[in-house]
Image (cartoon, helix red, strand yellow):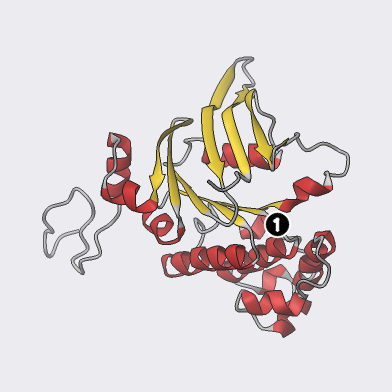
Amino acid sequence: MAQQLLQIKETSVRYKLPSGGSFEAVKGVNLAVEPASVVGLVGESGCGKSTLAKAVCGLVPVSGGEILFKGNPVAPLGMRRRPRELMRIQMVFQNPYASLNPRRTIGSQIADGLRANPVKDSWSVADLLQQVELPTETQSRYPHQFSGGQRQRIAIARAIAAGPELLIGDEPIASLDASLQAKVATLMRKLALESGAALLFISHDLAVVRIIADQIAVMQRGSLVEQGSAAQVWEDPQREYTKRLLAAIPAVDGMGRLPGVNTVTEGKI
């Protein structure tokens, strides 16, 4: 059995509410990610996927359990410089409009990642732009000069530049056109594995996750309800919730049918 790169053990995250109470967004989750593997974390919006990803990065503190990266606890991010070892965890956020600095060129932002990479001269800015299928001469441009899909590819290039051992995609395709979603997801898998990193890919879209993931974990209301290989979860789901997620995938039949709709009324809206 391969050594586990990331171990999430009985992890819970609780948010304080303005009213004085609290809300448990993540409830006793157990999940492991092995080196050079792709794990898809799926579930409906609001189920706690992004909160769990932020906890793995140290962006939110855990209220119970622990998160270990290469056997060491992940401490919450504070005002001090992040420990170099934890910089081997990199995240690509959902919104490329907000994750890039609008006042700096994309080349300078990718170069920031390269400076954090412990393996010097592993990439160049031009190399990374080519890897994400952008012309090298665009490195002098600013984020507003790119489309949403191009911005997300720039964010991926910046994350890979830092030489991560664990790359996290937090709904990285949710804001993209349907025609780009599978392409960007496949690109993330390719670049992560080619650079030697594992990928934790978070999405509510099981159809895309099936394409890129080796293992799938299904999350509902803060808890993991099913885990298994991508083929197992897709072909033989054990939980009713997983079956509903699969049933919600639109059928590509040329007739415009949606799940649960058995007939199409012609000439009517």
Task: Residue 195: name its quadrant.
Answer: bottom right
The quadrant of the picture occupied by the C terminus is: bottom left
Give the image location of residue 112, x and y in percent.
82, 63
- On the question of residue 268 being in view, the answer is yes
Circle 1 SS class: loop
Above or below residue 56? Residue 200 is below
Residue located farthest toward the front when viewing the structure as drawn: 1
Towards the viewer: 261 or 169: 169
* Residue in the foreground of this view, choosing between 10 and 182: 10
Q: Percent from the top left, x then y, of residue 187? A: 54, 68
135 left or right of 244 in image: right
Residue at image point 59% right, 19% down: 22
Whether residue 22 sits left or right of residue 101 in the image: it is: left
Q: Sort mark 1 into few (<14), some (14-19) or many (20+) by Cα contacts within 10 Å.
A: many
User: Where does the image place residue 81, in percent across and percent down from the top left?
Assistant: 87, 44
| Closer-to-camera residue (203/144) | 203
Where 118 falls versus 54 (above or below)? below
Q: Residue at x 11, y 59 (%)?
A: 265
Outermost residue, top side: 20
| Residue 252 at x, y percent in the picture | 25, 65
- Residue denoted by label 1: 164
Residue shown at 44% from the left, 66% from the top = 182
At 82% from the left edge and 59% from the top edge, which residue is drawn? 116
Q: How many marks?
A: 1
Rendering quarter of residue 4: top right
Amino acid at dot 1: Pro
Q: Is 213 positioned to the left or the right of 37 in the image? A: left
Residue furthest to the right: 80
| Res 248 seen here | no
